[in-house]
Image (cartoon, rainbow, N blue to C red):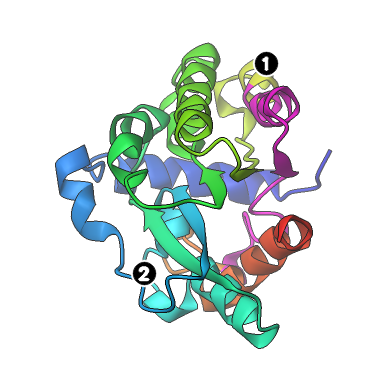
Amino acid sequence: MYKINVLGLFFMWLVMAASCGGKEKTASESKKTVPVSIGSSNLKTILFFGNSLTAGYGVEPSQSFPALIQDKIDSLQLSYKVINAGVSGETSAGGNSRIDWILKQPVDVFVLELGANDGLRGVPVDETQRNLQSIIDKVKAKYPDAKLVLAGMQVPPNMGQKYASDFQSIFPVLAKKNGMALIPFLLEKVGGEAKLNQEDGIHPSPEGHRILAENVWSVLEKEL
C-alpha cells in the first residue's frame, strides 16, 4: 500500500471532477493531438496512451513526463522514439474508441495510462476494467510482439472505501492477466503534494512531471 496525502488527494480529485469533466475529445478530434515524431525509421516506438497526465496539461511539451523519458532515452543512446498520445479528460471508454486510429502507427512498447477520470466520475469498476482490457486486446491483436506497460492509479475514499479498493485493484489484476509490467502508482510522491502540482492542485508541475518520469522509468527501463 502506498502512502499518500489522502486529504490532499481528495481535494485534488474534487477539483479535477469540475475542471476536466468536459474536456473529453472524440476520436476524430484526438487525431490532432498526437505529435509528429521526426527521426530514423529504424527507431522503435514507445507509445504513451493516456489522459491529461500523459498529455502534460499546463506545462510545456518538453516538460511532460513522456518528453522527459525521451530525454533519458537519448542520453543513453537507446534506439527508441516516444509518441505522446495523451488527451486531457480521456476516460477508458474514450480511449477504447480512439485506440484503433492510434494503432495505425507502429508500436513496439505500449504504455497505458487511463482510468483516473473514470474513478473521479464513479464509473463502475467492472466497466473501467472491461474498457482497459479491450484496449489491451486491440494492441495485442495488432502488435502481438509489443511490450506492454500499465500505469496504476488510486482514488480517495470519497465514494466509499470499497470502491477505492476495487478501483486500485484493477491495475495489478490487468497487469498479471496480460503479462504487463506495472507502474504501481503513477502519482507516487506527487499526488496531493501542493508544491509538486500546478495552481489547480491536480495537474503536476514541471517538478512533479520529473518525479512521474522517475516513477515510469524505474519500470520502463527494464522493458527496453
The quadrant holding residue 169 is top right
How crowded pointer 2 is (Cα within 10 Å; few <14, some 14-19, many 20+) is rated as some
SS class of the residue under badge 1? helix
- Residue at the spot of label 1: 162
Depth check: give the residue in front, 90 or 80. Answer: 80
Quadrant of the image containing the N terminus: top right
Report x, y in % for residue 121. 41, 28
- Residue at the spot of label 2: 58
Depth check: give the residue in front, 138 or 189. Answer: 138
How crowded pointer 1 is (Cα within 10 Å; few <14, some 14-19, many 20+) is rated as few
Q: Residue at x 42, y 65 (%)?
A: 56
The outermost residue toward the left is: 28
Q: Which mark is residue 201?
A: none
- Can you say whether 139 is above or below 210 in the image? above
Task: Give left or right: position of 136 versus 177.
Answer: left
The outermost residue toward the front is: 42
Q: Amino acid at mark 2?
A: Gly
Q: Residue at x 64, y 79 (%)?
A: 72
Q: Which residues are magenta?
A: 167-196
Report x, y in % for residue 197. 53, 67
Is residue 26 something that shows in the picture? no
The outermost residue toward the bottom is: 75
Q: Residue at x 46, y 57 (%)?
A: 54
Q: Residue at x 51, y 49 (%)?
A: 12
Depth check: give the residue in front, 128 or 107. Answer: 107
Q: Amino acid at mark 1?
A: Lys
